[in-house]
Every structure is written in structure tokens, then in C-alpha cells.
Amino acid sequence: MNPDDSTIFPSKLRTLRGDEARVLLETQIAEHNGGLLSTLAKYRADTVRVWHDTIRAIEEFINVPFFGLDDDALVAWLMAVPLDGRFFRNPTLVTSVQAALRPHLEGGTVERFCRLMLQIAAISAGFRMNGQASFGAGITLDTIGDAMIYLQSRRRHFVSLLYLMPLACRGDVKLAPLDALNVLLPQVEHSCVTITSLHLKLMLLDALPEFTLQVDEQGALASHWLETLDPWFADPERASIVVMNELRGDQIAMHSSEPVDPTKIFSAAELRNSIKLLVRPTKRSGSMTLTSKPWQLLSSACRIGVATTTSSRSESQNCGPCCGNRGNAIPAIGSVFSSTGPQQNTPSIRTRSSHS
């Protein structure tokens, strides 16, 4: 059942309230959870690494036009590059994008960006063949700019899957990196977004005595919806790591930031700069004191060039999607999907400021 399907046949409508509506919502949540877990259960435990690398590429894809390029004309051109049928009719588009990005970004970032272009174009074609051309109000996969908006709107679901995988992936099927989006994006669209929507409806049911569901064979339509405060898919319940500097800059003595390689979208140096923003600076012989054990460990790991998820990554390499201001640290989500918040309807891209 798609809880957001508004194709309702008046002659077959039923109105559910109270416990009856709750039973329907909780049953659907359980069914989607079960389907998601059974899908993941087929794959090996190292699927978490494959999906983490995919998220890294997604974060870079979102951030490259806004924080990796200083040329407004180039950004405008890049955002307009088609990924629909026009992409397949013009195979030189990939080489054109590679040539445009190489002067500005390191080779690995360019390679991942273009590979994700190809994956998204193929996935978009697959969705269209199955009758799905849009993914919410105004969200499509027709251009790079459209794909960025789509990926941004789903990024919390991507991360939620990452958290679920160590518990759920217990099988013997290897997930190839090029197949990761093909396998998991349909799960995101069919179950993850739906689970979030269903949990939101449960909250509205608890908060509003007048809440009802109109149900027919096609789906359920809620009488109320919640518009969250933030229109940018940017986790409005969490404060930016720079908010204290913005609001109390005259009261806080901040230490200088390390230089960051402009050709990298993520780096250990950028993560260390973010850590300085997350902890309270104290003047002690001109250095910062980290007052909590987790931050001490994380800072030490970054000093020796070890990413928090990989034991052999060098300082010169990107740290991945959990590092730096531009991609935001992987958010702490209490339960798998119930805490991820509603999908917004206003397309937008995350601002540079990280959230903690």
C-alpha cells in the first residue's frame, strides 16, 4: 500500500479513526520492515562497505557543484546536463563532464561523479519503464540538478539503511558496487519513504483527535499532514555546528582552522576543523582541550590519518561522507526509520554548514 496515493474511489471509501487507523498503520509498518529486512538478509556482511562507498559518491555528487566549483557558468551548465533519454542519445556527455571537472577536482572525485551519473541515468530509465517518472512534488531524475535534489531528499534513508545493514545483512550474496543503487533504490522508494510517512501519520494520530484515514483498494489518504520548519531536507531538529559561532561569536575564542585541499570534497583536515567547532574551546597554552573521550579518540584518529570507518586510509585521501562540513556527519538516528522525519516537498540542496 502506498500511504500517499491520492487515487481514491469515492464509492469504495472507508474512513478509519482511532484504534482502527492505528492497526492499519502499524500493520503496514511491520510489513514494509519485514520486506526490507528480508531483502537485506540475502547479502553478505561486507554490503555495509559497498553501501558506505555509494553514500560517499552520493555526497560528493550533491556537493561538487556548490562547494567544488567557483565558476557559476560551469555550475549552471553542469546542473542542466540531461540524465533522461537525451543522455543515451548523446554518449559524449560523460567525457564532456569529465573534461569540465578535471581542472577543479581530484581524479577520484571526478571518476565517482561520472560513474554515479551513469548509474542514475540507468536507474531513471528503469523507473520510467515501470511507470514512475517523479518522486514527490517537482522531483525527477531528468538532469544532474534534478538528481541532486532527489538524492538530497533521500539521503537520510540512505544513511538509515547503512545503520541497519550490520544487523540485517547475514547472507552469502555479494552486492557489486555498480549494482548497489539498482538493488537498494527501489527499496528506498517502496519501503523506506513509506515507513517514514506511516510513522508521521502515527504521530498525527496521537496528537490530533480528529485525524482520520480515508482508505480504499489503492491506498490511504490522511486528513492531516505536518509541514516541518525546514524546506531544505536539512534535518531541522538538529542545530548547525556553526550556530554558536554565529550567535555568540563575540563570546567564543575559536582556534584557527587548518587549510583544506580545494580539490577534495571531503578530507581529514576538514573533519578536524569541524571537531573544533563541535567542542568548547578553552585557552590553555594556545591549544584546544577536548573534554570528552569520544572526541579525543576521533581527533586522534584524524591526526594520524585514519578515517573512523577504515583503518588504512591515509591523510592524503578523502575521509568519505562522514567527514567534513560539506556532506554532514552521518546523523544519529534513534530507530531505523521512525526518526528520520517526513520528506519535504520543496526541492533544495543542503547548505555548507554541518549539523551535529
Image: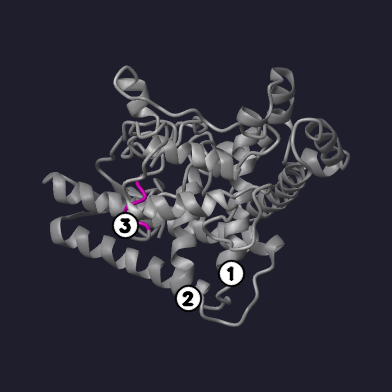
- Judged by its main secondary structure, the magenta piece is loop
Q: Amino acid at mark 2?
A: Ser
What residue span does the magenta drawing correspond to? 337-341
Find disc 2 in the rendering and name its residue: 38
- Identify the residue at horizontal 55%, vertical 37% (top origin): 149
Q: Amino acid at mark 1?
A: Thr
Measured in 3D between alpha carbons, the distance from the residue under mark 3 to the one under mark 2, in whole angstroms, is: 21 Å
Task: Give percent across and percent down for residue 253.
Answer: 36, 25
Find disc 1 in the rendering and name its residue: 47
Horizontal arrangement in the rendering, residue 65 relative to residue 270 (left or right):
right
Between discs 3 and 2, the one toward the N terminus: 2
Indicate the secondary structure of the residue bearing disc 1. helix
Would you identify the image quadrant in which residue 105 lies?
Answer: top right
Can residue 13 be seen here?
Answer: no
Indicate the secondary structure of the residue bearing disc 3. loop
Would you identify the image quadrant in which residue 237 lies?
Answer: top left
Indicate yes or no whether the magenta region holds residue 129: no
Find disc 3 in the rendering and name its residue: 334
State the count of labels.
Answer: 3
- Identify the residue at horizontal 32%, vertical 36% (top origin): 280
- Identify the residue at horizontal 75%, vertical 47% (top origin): 108
Of all residues shown, which one is farthest toward the front?
285
Q: Are marks 2 and 1 in contact (CB under 8 Å)?
A: no
Task: Give percent across and percent down for residue 19.
Answer: 14, 61
Label 1: few (<14), some or many (≥20) within 10 Å?
many
- Colour style of the rendered protein structure: one colour
Label 2: few (<14), some or many (≥20) within 10 Å?
few
In which quadrant of the rendered image does the C terminus lie?
Answer: top left
| 173 lies above or below 269 | below
